[in-house]
Amino acid sequence: MGVIEVQAPGLLTTVQDLGREGFGPLGVSPSGAADAISLRTGNQLVGNAQGEAGLEMTLLGGTFAFPDGAVLALAGSDFGATLDGESVELWISFEAKPRQVLRLGPTRSGARCYLCVRGGIETKLFLGSASTHLLSGLGGHQGRALRKGDLLKVGSAKGALRKRTLATASLKDLAPGKVLRATPGPQGEWFSQAAQRAFFEGTYRVAEESNRMGLRLEGPPIPDGAHGEMTSEGVSLGAIQIAAGGLPIVLFVEQQTTGGYPKIANVISADLHSLGQLRPRDEIRFEPVDFATARALLIKQEKLLASENLIV
């Protein structure tokens, strides 16, 4: 068992796993990795189970020392990582020798980079998950983003160690996109055909106020329809609410579990990882798909993640 010493935390770095499902009726959102595909893949690269806890860095990475050494992998966006000054590639496992230092800088591509360590990060579980829920201050490392001087315990690992790389074809298939496919929302029929056409034909920009709770979008407002409040009801991850001003809000991993705005559509499960890589001012659009297509795309993605050809 080793440790990770946080020498600099970056802009927003938290401990995340795949979240805590099933507690929405109690008012607890799942939290977990904003880009679960990257976390799952990074864990496989170091020989972990897909759901082990790792570090999620947002927009600006941190600096981490490994007093006892570690086997690591970086997944997600390119943060220009170096290990003792030598460049480190994404999507490949590598060894940090004792006392080596890993440094990451500002993003060169998407929003988030994941640091996975063989053995996973050990922390006290909250409702069965190690993920940090920032709004409530629960889970992860003391319920908060990392700070300089934090020490994180690394779990023990079993089995043979070998160098692993993500297959090039798999990387292409799992790459996040800026066109988000969406199924009809629970209140989709409340919006006129003209309003739905405007939504799916419009281009939106991710607002600066976006966070892990939700992505606020800027662009052409929906011209008519069910603007404003309604009786609150349960909401799902990826739900696209239309607020009173006619602009969309996409609910994300730390979402409130109920909402009082009508939902015109819902981002499909296979595209949720794309939400996690969106930066402020990124431009996106939505593409309508039916439920059968959404299910088929998720099954295809899950088969790829379970394939023996994913890692080479």
Image: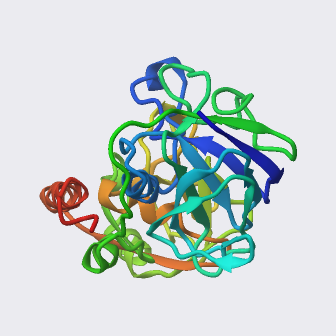
Question: Which residue is located at x 46 percent, y 81 percent?
Answer: 202
Q: Position of residue 107 (x, y in %)?
A: 67, 75
Q: Quadrant of residue 297?
A: bottom left
Q: Position of residue 173 (x, y in %)?
A: 28, 74
Image quadrant holding the N terminus, namely: top right
Is residue 184 visible to the viewer in this orientation of the structure? no
* The one of 249 and 111 positioned closer to us in this rendering: 111
Q: Is residue 311 left or right of residue 210?
A: left
Q: Position of residue 231 (x, y in %)?
A: 50, 32
Q: Position of residue 16 (x, y in %)?
A: 56, 42
Is residue 163 visible to the viewer in this orientation of the structure? yes
Question: Which residue is located at x 46 percent, y 26 percent?
Answer: 24
Question: Which residue is located at x 46 percent, y 30 percent?
Answer: 20
* The one of 108 and 311 positioned closer to us in this rendering: 311
Q: Quadrant of residue 299?
A: bottom left
Instruction: Using the image, determine if residue 151 lies above or below residue 240.
Output: above
Q: Is residue 39 left or right of residue 309?
A: right
Instruction: Using the image, determine if residue 311 lies above or below residue 266.
Output: below
* The one of 306 and 241 positioned closer to us in this rendering: 306
Question: Which residue is located at x 34 percent, y 52 percent?
Answer: 185
Instruction: Using the image, determine if residue 209 lies above or below residue 24.
Output: below
Image quadrant holding the C terminus, namely: bottom left
Q: Quadrant of residue 288?
A: bottom left
